[in-house]
Image: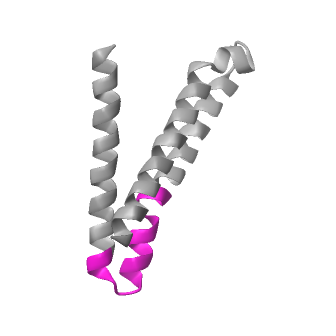
Amino acid sequence: MENIKRAIINSLGVFIYVAIVAFVMNNAEKIFGKMDSVIGAVGFLMIFVLSAGVVGTLIIGKPIMLYIDNKKKEAVSLLIWTLICLAFITLIVLLYLGLK
């Protein structure tokens, strides 16, 4: 039960982070102005790299720590539950988009 609760929290964290990044990217020109130089591409790639780190930590950080602590079943369970929760959130978002 603890794994399910943590999986839900981590998945919601991923969703919120992705929503914030999507909002910033969708409104980037309004927020930062038009960027004709290479700095716009650098900014985009930096967000991409940061996102990989944040989302990777939320999804696999705790399972790795559990695995290292020799709690292998708990680690795999948490990872699977997190992926199930992420799939569920993704399905909800896609269904919402399909209904628009």
Residue 42 placement, left or right of 87: right
The residue at the far right in this view is 32
Q: Quadrant of residue 41?
A: top right
Residue drawn at 28 percent across, 70 percent down: 76
Looking at the image, can residue 98 be seen? yes
Span colored in magenta: 57-74
Residue drawn at 28 percent across, 44 percent down: 87
Frontmost residue, 1 versus 32: 1
Q: Is residue 84 above or below residue 76?
A: above
The residue at the far front in this view is 1
Judge whether residue 58 is colored magenta.
yes
Determine the main secondary structure of the stretch shown in magenta: helix
Q: Is residue 85 above or below residue 1?
A: above
Q: Is residue 52 above or below residue 76?
A: above
Q: Quadrant of residue 31?
A: top right
Q: Position of residue 33 (x, y in %)?
A: 73, 14
Frontmost residue, 42 versus 70: 70
Q: Position of residue 23 (x, y in %)?
A: 57, 26
